[in-house]
Amino acid sequence: MKYLMLVAVLFVPAYASAAGPSEVVVYKAADLQSLGKKLSPKVNEEKIAVENLDNFGNHFTMVAHREGNGQVEIHEHYADVFVVVSGHATLLAGGTDKEAKATEPGEFRGGTILGGQRHALGPGDIVHIPATVPHQLLLDPNQSFTYFVLKVKTD
């Protein structure tokens, strides 16, 4: 039920890109799809382009577009909620990764997930990844994947 509420809030017909503390912000599906297409030419050597949307203090939003596998990520202080906008990917999550290196305080990248579970993802799917859980997105060759991300501070 929590996820249905999130979807209802995300896809009501209005869009705002900068919000104050008492403003309602709605991200329209068509706007997120359009933003994903605009991000494609900006994909970096790691096969990802990201655009930050709004910051609300204890959580913030962004859109990410991938055209290749991501690195293993571990966030010590943030849970991730993904809403798939377009494309298909496999989420490898859970298990352990003892090789990840700190890229900034509380953020780790790299290594290999051992013992994780695979989850097929497609448009409309919603994923919650708790803080400290290793995760990685895997794409088939020549595929792209666009997703909305809600990052929620957990402490």
Image (cartoon, rainbow, N blue to C red):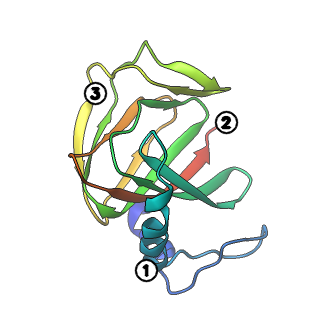
Q: Nearer the viewer, mark 2 or mark 1?
A: 1
10 Å crowding of disc 1: few (<14), some (14-19), many (20+)? few
Q: Residue 104: x and y, percent?
A: 66, 27
Tell me the CA gap for discs 2 and 3. Answer: 25 Å
Which label belongs to residue 30? 1
Q: Secondary structure at mark 2?
A: loop
Q: Nearer the viewer, mark 2 or mark 3?
A: 3
Q: Nearer the viewer, residue 104 or 75?
A: 104
Which label belongs to residue 116? 3
10 Å crowding of disc 2: few (<14), some (14-19), many (20+)? few
Q: Which amino acid, mark 3? A: Gly
Q: Nearer the viewer, residue 96 or 103?
A: 103
Tell me the CA gap for discs 3 and 1. Answer: 33 Å
Q: Residue 115: x and y, percent?
A: 26, 21
Q: Is residue 67 above or below residue 7?
A: above
- 107 vs 19, left or right, is left
Tell me the CA gap for discs 2 and 1. Answer: 33 Å
Residue occupying the point 54% across, 54% down = 50
Q: Secondary structure at mark 3?
A: loop
Q: Which amino acid, mark 1? A: Ala
Marked residue nearer the N-terminal end (3 or 1): 1
Residue occupying the point 34% across, 20% down = 112
Which label belongs to residue 126? none
Q: How many marks?
A: 3
Q: Which amino acid, mark 2? A: Asp
Residue occupying the point 52% across, 34% down = 131
Marked residue nearer the N-terminal end (2 or 1): 1
Q: Nearer the viewer, residue 63 or 79?
A: 63
Q: Quadrant of the N terminus?
A: bottom left
Which residue bears the numbered disc 2? 155
